[in-house]
Image (cartoon, rainbow, N blue to C red):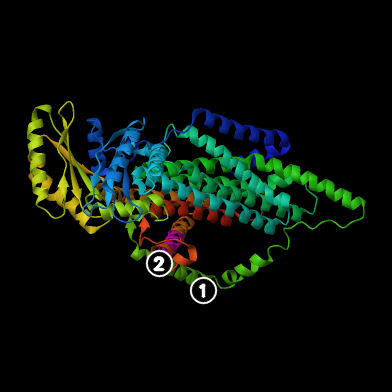
């Protein structure tokens, strides 16, 4: 890899304009091809896991899948509800909704037990994943009816509008993060280099790498579908590794320039830097790639999407550091030489190149470790272990509607819906597949299941049994009057799967049955993830050991690398739990704690932190005098 990096740097240094032009063409082609083919987004089927996923697949086979629904609450702005006006508004709303091409049907209005709210449910056509894109048309009709009846309060909620609100909130947060990240990065680089030009090089290369990776990710999405998080992770990881790789190479070149005292040409300086930093960048990039690739073993579309985005942007960032960066350094070096000659002709002193004396601050920071390595090691390990301690109290939750921020308007309406219509809170969907000849037997068993559930306080009602046109698939929906994240909701799922189904549909020979619904999803996904966790972590430790052993040519250093990665990743996750699982930092960071951590967060961060830790270890160990 050393010789490969040097050869690449030598070619770029000898033909800088070709290298720079080639990189720009590459970026444009990636964006152009990506825009032409578009992004292949993950479908509802891609998210199915566990028993809930099997139930959804069977229901879809019989065209009996759950439809995305929006609920419109009609209430009085003041005083008691005017039943006549509310009925007229509900009729107007129903007629408007039924004319929309996005709507599959509108249920008859239902009055709440306290006669204060009228509920209209609207079912949408198409896939559940696409429903949020259809919400605006429904909201427009709800608002139009509200203007027609100013004395009534028209409010809309539902999974599609909540998903749309969550996406908007997430997008706003990411936009704010990006607005903060770029200026902070630029200021940091200015402090390091003291030059706008030199500070702009890492930033511009990182941004161009991100642009190319976005285009390539669109192409790759036709192999591994995008779950809607690919671009986000490309921006986050791309800026980090893009600046890192460029900064490491750039800093090394400036150090060699300061050491040579002007005796070496820009081309020779670039080759010298590539002899150490080029190899480190390639090894570090591969380390991040192989560690992130272990996420594919989780068999989860979101993890796969995160892994794909990370791998693509890291590979592109490595490519930019091996091609465009050496060419830019040569052109900048030639410009610096011209300026030096002009200063000499005018009798001015040569401008000092940063690199000789700028390491004093870092030397001071590292002095304790160099003078007392054992004591520093022990204190560092104890500090990392202390930070990792909160992991023992880690609580994992599958993020759901009940955990979303109430700053989202649809969530506030959702809370009112749950308070006013408690029977709307949770629905379990029992799906049975059997031969068409046994359809009558299946229907009888499902009705018996509904009767038994009706005698259980964990359930509040059942729908009629629905059967597919070919009589092979049957569906029964059971209502639960508890919130989806409550113990009672999970108890009802356990009762249904453990007792009611085995005693009824479970006795039908040859029949396949399963339960779906929001609570089933919330229960099955963490179970699926936990079943994959040993495989992912085992593979992660193995590839980390293999990569560090290869990079350092030492089994001992490989083992040390694994241990250090474990410590640093555990400490980072412990700090995450300490801050976000508790409530003490809510006012400081302006967030509302759910008392838990999202189920996908720990594994993703653990894998990414392993990759980045190995990244920096390679940088540190590879740092040494060049022998090119």
Q: Is residue 165 left or right of residue 180?
A: left
Q: x, y percentage for residue 39?
A: 47, 33
Q: Secondary structure at mark 1?
A: helix
Which image quadrant for residue 210?
top right
Q: x, y percentage for residue 149?
A: 37, 44
Whichever of labels 1 and 2 marks the residue nearer the N terminus, that label is 1
- Which residue is pictured at 63% across the width and 56% down the height? 624
The magenta span reads 566-577
Residue 626 showing in the rendered view = no
**Residue 85, above or below 33:** below
Report if residue 568 lies within the magenta region. Answer: yes
| Prevailing secondary structure class for the magenta stretch in the rendered image | helix
> Circle 2 sits on which residue?
583
**Residue 486, above or below 294:** below
Q: Secondary structure at mark 2?
A: loop
- Which residue is pictured at 25% across the width and 33% down the height? 60
**Residue 356, above or below 150:** below
Q: x, y percentage for residue 472?
A: 16, 29
Report if residue 357 lies within the magenta region. Answer: no
- Which residue is pictured at 40% across the width and 53% down the height? 601
Q: Nearer the viewer, mark 1 or mark 2?
A: 2
Characterize the local packing of mark 2: few (<14), some (14-19) or many (20 or more) Cα atoms within 10 angstroms.
some
> Circle 1 sits on which residue?
375
Spatial CA span between label 1 and label 2: 35 Å
């Amino acid at each position: 890899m050393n010789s490969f990096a040097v050869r690449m740097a030598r070619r770029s240094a000898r033909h800088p304009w070709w290298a720079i032009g080639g990189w720009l063409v590459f970026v444009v082609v990636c964006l152009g091809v990506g825009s032409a083919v578009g992004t292949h987004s993950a479908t509802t089927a891609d998210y199915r896991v566990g028993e809930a996923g099997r139930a959804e697949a069977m229901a879809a086979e019989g065209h009996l899948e759950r439809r995305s629904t929006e609920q419109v609450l009609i209430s009085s702005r003041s005083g008691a509800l005017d039943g006549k006006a509310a009925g007229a508004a509900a009729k107007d709303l129903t007629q408007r909704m039924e004319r929309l091409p996005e709507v599959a049907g509108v249920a008859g209005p239902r009055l709440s037990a306290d006669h204060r709210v009228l509920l209209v449910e609207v079912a949408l056509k198409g896939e559940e994943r696409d429903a949020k894109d259809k919400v605006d048309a429904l909201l427009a009709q709800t608002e139009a009816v509200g203007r027609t009846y100013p004395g009534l309060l028209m409010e809309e909620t539902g999974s599609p509008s909540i998903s749309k609100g969550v996406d908007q909130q997430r997008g706003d947060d990411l936009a704010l993060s990006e607005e903060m990240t770029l200026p902070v990065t630029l200021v940091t680089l200015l402090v390091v280099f003291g030059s706008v030009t030199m500070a702009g090089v890492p930033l511009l290369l990182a941004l161009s790498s991100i642009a190319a990776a976005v285009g390539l990710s669109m192409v790759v999405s036709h192999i591994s579908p995008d779950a809607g998080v690919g671009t986000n992770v490309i921006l986050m990881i791309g800026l980090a590794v893009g600046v890192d790789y460029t900064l490491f190479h750039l800093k090394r070149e400036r150090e060699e320039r300061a050491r040579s005292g002007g005796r070496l040409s820009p081309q020779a300086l670039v080759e010298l830097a590539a002899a150490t930093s080029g190899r480190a960048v390639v090894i570090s990039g591969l380390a991040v790639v192989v560690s992130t690739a272990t996420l594919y073993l989780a068999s989860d579309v979101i993890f796969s999407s995160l892994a794909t985005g990370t791998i693509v942007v890291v590979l592109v960032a490595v490519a930019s550091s091996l091609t465009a960066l050496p060419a830019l350094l040569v052109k900048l070096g030639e410009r610096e030489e011209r300026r030096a000659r002009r200063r000499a002709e005018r009798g001015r002193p040569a401008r000092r190149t940063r690199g000789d004396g700028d390491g004093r601050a870092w030397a001071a920071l590292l002095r304790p470790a160099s003078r007392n390595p054992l004591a520093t090691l022990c204190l560092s390990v104890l500090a990392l272990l202390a930070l990792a301690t909160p992991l023992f109290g880690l609580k994992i939750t599958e993020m759901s509607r009940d955990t979303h921020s109430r700053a989202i308007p649809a969530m506030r309406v959702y809370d009112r819906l749950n308070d006013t219509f408690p029977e709307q809170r949770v629905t379990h969907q029992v799906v049975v597949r059997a031969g068409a000849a046994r359809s009558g037997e299946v229907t009888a068993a499902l009705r018996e299941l509904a009767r038994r559930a009706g005698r259980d306080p964990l359930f509040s009602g059942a729908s009629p049994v629905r059967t597919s046109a070919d009589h092979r698939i049957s569906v029964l929906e059971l209502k639960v009057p508890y919130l989806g994240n409550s113990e009672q909701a999970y108890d009802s799922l356990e009762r249904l799967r453990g007792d009611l189904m085995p005693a009824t549909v479970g006795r039908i020979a040859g029949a396949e049955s399963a339960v779906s619904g929001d609570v089933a999803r919330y229960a099955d996904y963490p179970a699926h993830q936990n079943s994959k966790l040993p495989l992912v972590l085992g593979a992660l430790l193995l590839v980390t050991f293999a990569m560090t052993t290869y990079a350092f040519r030492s089994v001992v250093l490989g083992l040390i690398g694994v241990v250090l990665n474990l410590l640093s990743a555990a400490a980072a996750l412990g700090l995450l739990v300490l801050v976000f699982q508790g409530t003490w930092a809510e006012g400081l960071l302006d967030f509302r704690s759910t008392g838990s951590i999202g189920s996908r967060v720990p594994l993703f961060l653990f894998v990414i932190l392993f990759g980045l830790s190995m990244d920096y270890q390679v940088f540190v160990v590879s740092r040494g005098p060049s022998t090119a």
